[in-house]
Image (cartoon, rainbow, N blue to C red):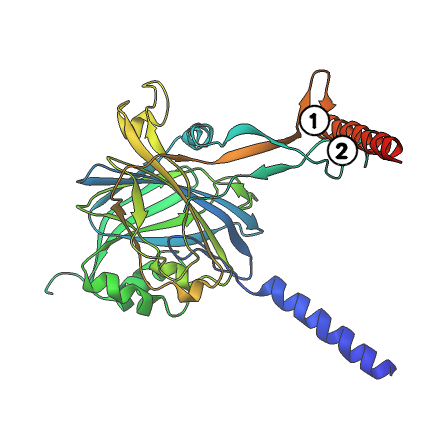
Amino acid sequence: MKRRILVLLFALLATQLGSLISPAWACGCGAMIPEGYARIGVEKETSVVRWDGRTEQIVMRFVVRGDAPRAAWIMPVPGRATVELADGAMFGQLSQMTEPQEKTRHYFWPREGDWPFSAGSGDRMAGAMPGAGAPSVGVVGREQLGDFDVARLTATDPDALRNWLESNGFKLPDGLAAELKPYVDQKWEYVAVRLAPRQEGKKLQGTLDPLKIRFDSNRLVYPMRLSRMAKNPQSLGLYVLADHRMEPGSTIGGSAPKVTFAGTVTARKDTPLAELTGGKPVFLTAIDQEFPEPGRIDGDHELRATAKDTPYRRTVYDDELLTVGDGIPVWLLTVSAALVVSAAAVTLLLRRRRRTS
């Protein structure tokens, strides 16, 4: 028995140690890989996508956890890209624009927490959702943006692209070349980002500075195919700014996308969001999606205009007991009135029986 217990404890210890030293790859749009035996995971990826029919701009922000001092990720783009740091304040601005509206919803019969059961208040409930000859790798540019080492590349050979990345400090996982081949065949270009904090000993934790990637595109596409290499479930949040309400063409292997806001918004010219919209009215569609099994991701998100620009906003209800006057429950008055009427009816019936007897 003691031997079995020791074997079990050893197996559990080995499992825990294995989870500590195994690299974790995670990213909603590309492949994020830590250096050596460090760990990193993307808890949330949120992106703002602005598309005017000709040009697409993606502002990406990651919330990461782990102990990695350095990591790298790569994002394919359909055209020549420029990259710069963005102002993270726009995410707070969008969060305020899309926050749920609050409404009060009354109920008749008392619930748990109401008198006579106990003192307290009702629960908050969310409203329902609506439904050749050239070099195999070319370096377009390479910049240091804050803690980011950014390389903009072209490639005609996925293996050569992988070799260039690894020889230039971008350590990437096995199998990446195979996943990059569809992009190479379509002659896409690449933004490779190495996250290397300049502050000695700084770890990649918390909310990272957002990056803005801009490129020409006659269709609204959000690269996701490389996320199939992730080992952990992925969570994606998209704020899409366009002329119309937008929707993904398919689930691409994830759960059904959920629209959390849809409507026309206008950003003041002195705010970060105005850098994307020019201060003009645009239609904002906020979309959330989960990828429980990243290996099932089978393509990139291609978003299209919906048939109608139907606005939508989530509603959060404050459920309150229906009362009148100084907080007297309507159900109590109703029951009391019913008892009075019943008592009167019984009294009248008894009187009639006495008269006839």
277 up-or-down from 203: above or below: above
- Looking at the picture, tell me which residue is in the foreground, 313 or 36: 313
22 up-or-down from 263: above or below: below
Q: Which residue is mark 1?
A: 330
Residue 172 in sight in this render: no
Residue 260 in sight in this render: yes
286 up-or-down from 187: above or below: above
Give the secondary structure at mark 1.
helix
Q: Quadrant of residue 354?
A: top right
List x then y, in percent, for residue 17.
66, 66
114 to the left or right of 54: right
- Looking at the picture, tell me which residue is in the foreground, 12 or 133: 12
- Looking at the picture, tell me which residue is in the foreground, 349 or 343: 349
Of callouts 2 and 1, the N-terminal one: 2
Q: CA distance from mark 2 to mark 1?
A: 13 Å
Assess whether mark 1 and mark 2 are in contact (beta carbons under 8 angstroms): no
Crowd class of label 1 (few under 14; some 14 to 19; many from 20; radius 10 Å): some
Question: What amino acid type should be assigned to the residue bearing mark 2?
Answer: Asp
Q: Quadrant of residue 104?
A: top right
The nearer-to-camera label among 2 and 1 is 1
List x then y, in percent, for residue 1.
87, 83
Q: Residue furthest front?
A: 356
Q: Which residue is mark 2?
A: 114
Question: What amino acid type should be assigned to the residue bearing mark 1?
Answer: Val
List x then y, in percent, for residue 92.
46, 30
Q: Quadrant of the C terminus?
A: top right
